[in-house]
Image (cartoon, rainbow, N blue to C red):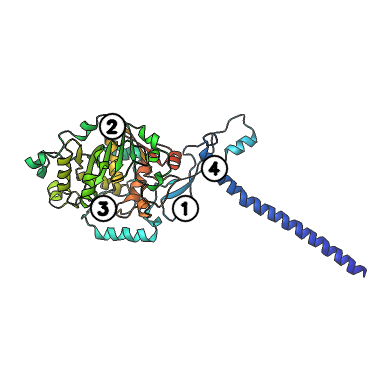
Amino acid sequence: MVHINVLKKLMYVLVVILVALTVCLWRETRRSYYDPLKTRNDDLQGHRSSEKWNPVKSQGLFHEAASELGQISRMWLGAPNKVKDSTAVTAEKSKKAAFVKVWDKDSSSRNLIPRLQKVRKNYLALNKYNVTYNGKRSAKLSPEKLLCQLRDRVNVTMIQRSDGPFGTSEWHQYLPGKSLSETVGHLGRCAVVSSAGSLKSSRLGQEIDSHDAVLRFNGAPVRGFQDDVGQKTTIRLVNSQLVTVEEQQFLREPLYNTGILIVWDPAPYHAEIHEWYRKPDYNFFESYKAYRSTHPEQPFYILNPKMQWQLWDILQENSLEHIQPNPPSSGMLGIVIMMTLCDEVDVYEFLPSKRQTDICHYYQKFHDHACTMGAYHPLLFEKNLVKHMNQGTDEDIYTHGKVTLPGFRKVHC
């Protein structure tokens, strides 16, 4: 009987010990779960409060694996400099890293979703524009040398009255008499505003309008979206498909009566103007003439098609893999145009911010990964290039979707 009582007491003691261990383990597990969660929440709170946000530059960046879309990498920004007389607790707090997501300049097609990988391979096989690139590959130039390369090798010009088939008396009455640079004059700070869905609810309108000049794309409206995208339009770059397929809307829509218009059309790889003129991708010439007849005072330029392939060559030369053999996007063309005209260029939501979304345009509700990553255009590789040249901070990209680039006249080679 005595042995049984002793055994029961031992069992009770073991049960108490087991319960105590279980409680301790549970507390430790809860702590390990909530601490990282709290860190992430505190970081998000920090981006909403300028007093708490203490960004650090580019020391000790750590890239985690890219997401399914491939365009976003996670970066841990290193700790700020320690104040000599700070306490151990303060020093420990200062080591907490800020968690931001920005574009990885080394993104590759391997990170594309399967559908976009297949689309890219189809375009590589199709090679519609007969691209026969024999230049260098994966040059990996420094940002400074890359800027010099763009400045010296990409000739941003508009079609002139002396250009081959445009030298006739018929065309003389339609093409502008002044060059684009003469029309805009000397520009200081400029903004290139993408049409990305991530501009929605950005509240960037006032900042965008503070620039000396603003470039917009295609049919991107400002009315009703002023708080997010501003209302100033200095230049509007449109593609030939919009001018041709939506001819009546283009000729009648007041949206296209503001600012300077520039139209561009894809041409065969490094084709001469005569060859392109005989067989444009979209025959926009009649629509162009109709618009000029209706709006003779409206500056309307045709981008020289040689520029697009000069830019494409640089994209390919600085990429580790084959890029789509199609012209660069309107966004990339617009960026280089403004770098030619301005001292400094701020580009909004070409690289996605924390508001990144699959919605293609801020004024529509169409969803597609291709609008961020590219399908027809080598958009992924364009974004790699822009991120590599960025002179702004990762915080600007994360919070504003803003990249800052120097104008070519400020580049010293």
Residue under circle 4?
A: 43
Near-viewer residue (200 or 119)? 200
Tell me the element at label 1: loop
The numbered mark, 2 or 3, whose residue comes first in the sequence reads: 3
- Disc 3 or disc 4, which is closer to the eye? 4
Tag 4 secondary structure = helix
Name the residue tied to disc 1: 65
Graded by Cα atoms within 10 Å as few (under 14), some (14 to 19) or many (20 or more), the crowding at tag 2 reads few
Q: Quadrant of the C terminus?
A: top left
Of the two numbered discs 1 and 4 in the rendering, the one whose residue sits closer to the viewer: 4
Q: Nearer the viewer, mark 3 or mark 1?
A: 3
Report the disc number at residue 13: none
Say whether disc 2 or disc 1 marks the residue closer to the N-terminus.
1
- State if disc 1 and disc 2 touch (CB < 8 Å): no
Q: In the image, what residue occupies the spot 27% across and 36% down?
A: 340
Mark 3 to mark 4: distance in Å? 40 Å
Asked if residue 228 can be seen in this view, the reply is: yes
Residue type at mark 4 is Asp
Instruction: Please state which amino acid type lies under the numbered disc 3.
Output: Asn
In the picture, residue 16 is in which quadrant?
bottom right
In the image, residue 121 above or below residue 291:
below
What residue did someone put label 3 on?
A: 326
Residue 409: mark = 2
Query: How would you rate the neighbour count of disc 3 (Cα within 10 Å): few for under 14, some for 14-19, many for 20 or more?
Result: many
Res 392 quadrant in image: top left
Q: Nearer the viewer's eye, disc 4 or disc 2?
A: 4
| Amino acid at circle 1 | Ala
- Spatial separation of the CA atoms under disc 2 and disc 3: 28 Å
